[in-house]
Amino acid sequence: MIRKTAGLVLSSIRYKDTSIIVKIFTRELGLKSYLVNGVRSMGKGSKMALYQPLTLLDLVVYNKENSGLQRISDAKLQRAHQRIPFDFSRTSIALFMTEVINRSIYENYQNESLFDFLTESVIILDQGEALLTHFPLVFLIEKAKFLGFSPEDAEGFLLESVHQPFSDQELPQILDYLERLLSDKYKCCDKVPVGLRRKLLDHLLDFYSQHMENSSSFKSLVVIRQVLE
């Protein structure tokens, strides 16, 4: 069956000489893997640029039930990124977002509300409307809501965690910061010490690991900590 859907590219791997297998989180069909032939061939006709992480696409796809690997009939760029590919901080955040998404959803997982949130987040990151030092934290906090394990309030992010990394002196400030992130989201512009922001990032990632099957360390953590400076 042929279906039209919006899609968010998450990753791709090489397949044979000129092809790739690309993972795309689609709005209507969920997370799918697609075989794209000839996309790595040299020349003007190459469409490899369409399948970079966090690229937003309009797709026409073949959707066969009980088939692990699907095919794409047509793929068009929904919007071209203006800043993400050319700004180190935004590129780093994009890679971090991709890793978090890849590790928290599974093949065929479908959630239109999550897709809409991810699309909005990518556009905000690319347009420069958010203060980047807060962006990864807001992304983790907001994404947890769509995955079903977000606490009801700021205090819950501490009480519902196995580990407690903050000192008694830090707790009032971190709770106030969490409340601000929850209320202001990507518009948050608070001035918070870098050490506290990094500590909160580590805590949120640990919080995610407690709710996901894959608890190994995040590969992009070293780079994303630099963005929080």
Image (cartoon, rainbow, N blue to C red):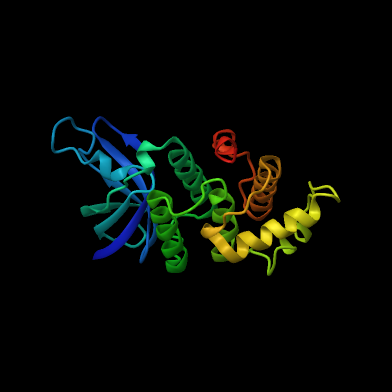
Q: Nearer the viewer, residue 132 or 74?
A: 132
Question: Does residue 209 appear anywhere in the picture?
Answer: yes
Q: Nearer the viewer, residue 94 or 163?
A: 94
Q: Name the quadrant containing residue 90.
A: top left
**Residue shown at 56% from the left, 45% from the top:** 133
Horizontal and vertical percent for residue 56? 32, 53
Residue 119 appears left or right of 149 = left
Horizontal and vertical percent for residue 48? 25, 39
**Residue shown at 40% from the left, 58% from the top:** 119
Residue 2 appears left or right of 94 = left
Horizontal and vertical percent for residue 57? 29, 54
Q: Is residue 163 above or below residue 228?
A: below
Residue 58 appears left or right of 221 = left
Question: Does residue 12 appear anywhere in the picture?
Answer: no
* The C terminus, quarter of image: top right
Residue 229 appears left or right of 77 = right
